[in-house]
Structure formats: C-alpha cells, structure tokens
Image (cartoon, grey):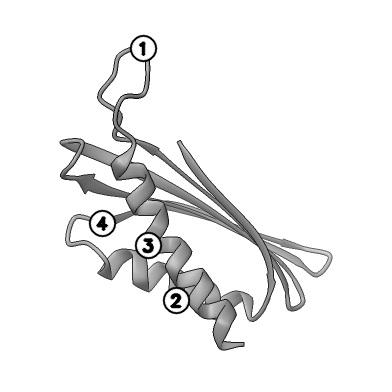
Amino acid sequence: MAKYQINLRGDFDELLERVNDEILSGSITASFEDGSDWQGGGVRCAVRVYERYSVSGGNRVSLNLTLVGNGDELFVSAIASGGSQGMFWKINTFGEESFLDGLVDVIEGYRRQL
C-alpha cells in the first residue's frame, strides 16, 4: 500500500476534474470504478476509486482518492493498493507506487501553478 496526503489551497472542482482527467488519460487500462460526493455546512467531500493494470505485477491495482474542501482549503488523501504478488507478505509494490506517483505529479503540478 502506498499513501499520499496533502493540504493545499485551490478550486475543489478544478482539482477534481484535473485529477480525474489525468488518471484516466495516463493509462489505456485505467478505469473509473465508482465515486461518492457529499456536501454540508460549506464542506465538500468527493471519493473516487480507480483501477488500472500493472504490467510489473501482472494484475490490477486500485487508487482511492478522497478530496475534502472548505472554501479554497483542500485536503487530499490518496491510497493505492493491490498488485502485490505475495500470499502472506507484499513482495512487489511497484504497481501501487507507480499509480500513486502519477497522481502526486498532477497535484504537485497544480499546487505549483497557484
């Protein structure tokens, strides 16, 4: 499992759209599995689950993205999982890390442009 969390400022809808577009265009095997949205008291929360095939692991890996916004204050939590080849221990986590690295690049690029 690989995890990334960050607090930043920006536009909730713009960041969510950019992340979604980049994940889905970053791999021909990437897919949007499901999502959930909530809003209350000025706070918004979007949860997205993506999957893609990992060549290095020979299986699919998932990426769970949670974006929370309160005005222009944003919090991102992303967790990638799957792709390990071990039965009892995680032997190969390259696929997870690679999937997460693509998301980190998008968010860090967004943050630098502000």
In percent of width and height, residue 96 lies at 36, 43
Q: Which residue is mark 2?
A: 18
- Amino acid type at circle 1 is Phe
Q: Which residue is mark 1?
A: 88
Question: Does 53 sit left or right of 72 as displayed?
Answer: left
Quarter location, residue 66: bottom right
Q: Which residue is mark 4?
A: 30
Given contact means CB atoms under 8 Å apart, are the residues at marks 4 and 2 in contact?
no
In percent of width and height, residue 51 lies at 31, 48
Q: CA distance from mark 3 to mark 1?
A: 27 Å
Is tag 3's residue or tag 4's residue first in the polypeptide sequence? 4
Q: Secondary structure at mark 4?
A: loop
Question: Does 88 sit left or right of 29 as displayed?
Answer: right
Give the label, 1 or 4, closer to the camera: 1
Q: Secondary structure at mark 3?
A: helix
In percent of width and height, residue 82 lies at 34, 34
- Amino acid type at circle 3 is Gly
Compared with 45, 86 (above or below) is above
Give the label, 3 or 2, closer to the camera: 3
- Amino acid type at circle 4 is Ala
**Residue at 35% in and 52% down:** 99
Q: CA distance from mark 2 to mark 1?
A: 37 Å
Given contact means CB atoms under 8 Å apart, are the residues at marks 3 and 1 in contact?
no
Q: Which quadrant does the N terminus fall into? A: top left
Is tag 1's residue or tag 4's residue first in the polypeptide sequence? 4
Q: CA distance from mark 4 to mark 2?
A: 15 Å
Label 2: few (<14), some (14–19) or many (≥20) C-alpha neighbours in 10 Å: some
Given contact means CB atoms under 8 Å apart, are the residues at marks 3 and 4 in contact?
no
